[in-house]
Amino acid sequence: MAITKEAVIEKLKTVRGPDLEGDIVGLGMVSDIFIADAKVFFSITVPAARAQELEPLREAAERAVKSMPGVAGAVVALTAEKKGGGMEARVPPRPAAPQPRPAPAQAPAARPAAPQGHGPSGHREGKRGVPGIDAIIAVASGKGGVGKSTTAANLALGLSANGLRVGVLDADIYGPSMPRLLGIRGRPQSVDGKVLKPMENYGLKVMSMGFLVDEETPMIWRGPMVMSALTQMLREVDWGPLDILVVDMPPGTGDAQLTMAQSVPLAGAVIVSTPQDLALIDARKGLNMFRKVDVPLLGIVENMSYFVAPDTGKRYDIFGHGGARNEAERLGVTFLGEVPIEMTIRETSDVGAPVVVSAPDGAMAKVYRDIAGKVWERLQEERGRAVAAPAIVFE
Ligand code: ADP
């Protein structure tokens, strides 16, 4: 029997609201529900300040719907109500609750030092480049789950499809996802007992902690260890020659991320955000982090931007689409493009064959190739700017 909207609503009434009061339907937190090909899409509106804390609620709702007979999949996103909306009144922020610290260990050694260079090209002055790599860019997000790794993988493949020699460095030491996303297994071999050969698939050279440590091995990292692992993956790998290396940063904007942004000779950064306000608050933190360390912002990608019903082709902006474009304009940052929420993007990622390679003629592959084109264009602009800036020579 085909699954109905009403049945989904009934099921969602079993999901308790925040603070275990009422249920998410009764509290008016559930958006309109879309069903296509037995897959269910909806969003849950929460106060922006409690987004991180309410992630388990999103997971509970997704689990509840997935458990229903006849449901092939569920995509649930948290969205933040704009200021002044009724949600804040119904679900009050909890001022006393301490904000959970991000997972990375905050060892004193990992704390950021003062930026090493200033001025238009300052970010490159204090940091050694990596031989054989022409440009290194970061893909970052203010929080997890916005599709940063999915975007990084498809962006890298898009750059490659546009004719560039591309590598991917998975800097998410705590939750490496590139081996799964790019369908690569096995261990990198050493060239000469010291330098490792990167793994390869789909024409990309790839390095990830996931190749070096078994998935089951509990990884207890301290700040300095994270940095030395990253430095090794960057400098003790036979990358070259590459036109561009895409670094998938760990999610968030904590000290560990800041140190990474500062230690890697980045030519630019791409921020991935979902459309809703709450992600944008985090995205702004991401922008500020790169500004702090003098890394040029190449732009913002809006992910899970809208939903196209597969049966009618009609577009639905269930996740409050447009936020990232407006915000990018307001902040003077390039808007690189929008990626719809698409079951094929998730499914192809899960099986290690991202859309850009598994459906190269499809609409989604084009979306990513266009974003890749814009990223490359922005990179050339920034380089032109850096070259044009007069060098100050002290004698
Ligand atoms: P992050 O790196 O930000 O934590 P991921 O890239 O792991 O996020 O994505 C989180 C989940 O969302 C994954 O299951 C991924 O397949 C899915 N996803 C990402 N982007 C999209 C999209 N545009 N449409 C549908 N699913 C997506």
Image (spheres, rainbow, N blue to C red):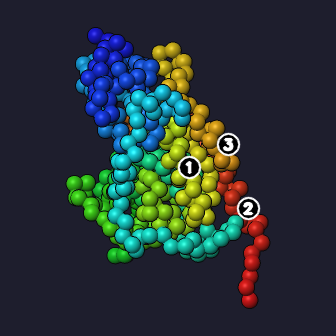
Disc 3 packing (10 Å; few <14; some 14–19; many ≥20): few
- Looking at the image, which residue is at 57% across and 71% down? 115
Task: Determine which quarter of the picture holds residue 345.
Answer: top left
Q: Which residue is mark 3?
A: 329
Q: Position of residue 383 (x, y in %)?
A: 69, 61
Quadrant including the N terminus:
top left
Q: Amino acid at mark 2?
A: Arg
Is residue 79 shown left or right of residue 381?
left
**Residue nearer the viewer, 108 or 139:** 108
Q: Can residue 355 be seen in the rendering of this structure?
A: no
Give how far apart the Cα atoms at labels 2 and 1 are: 24 Å
| Sequence-first disc among 2 and 1 | 1
| Residue at 53% across, 70% down | 130
Question: How dense is the environment of label 2, judged by Cα within 10 Å: few (below 14), some, or many (20 and up)?
Answer: few
Neighbour tally class for label 1: few under 14, some 14-19, many 20 plus, Cα within 10 Å: some
* Residue type at numbered disc 3: Glu
Q: Is mark 2 within 8 Å of ligand 1?
A: no
The residue singled out by tag 1 in the image is 284
N-terminal of the pair, mark 2 or mark 3, is: 3
Disc 3 to disc 1, C-alpha distance = 13 Å
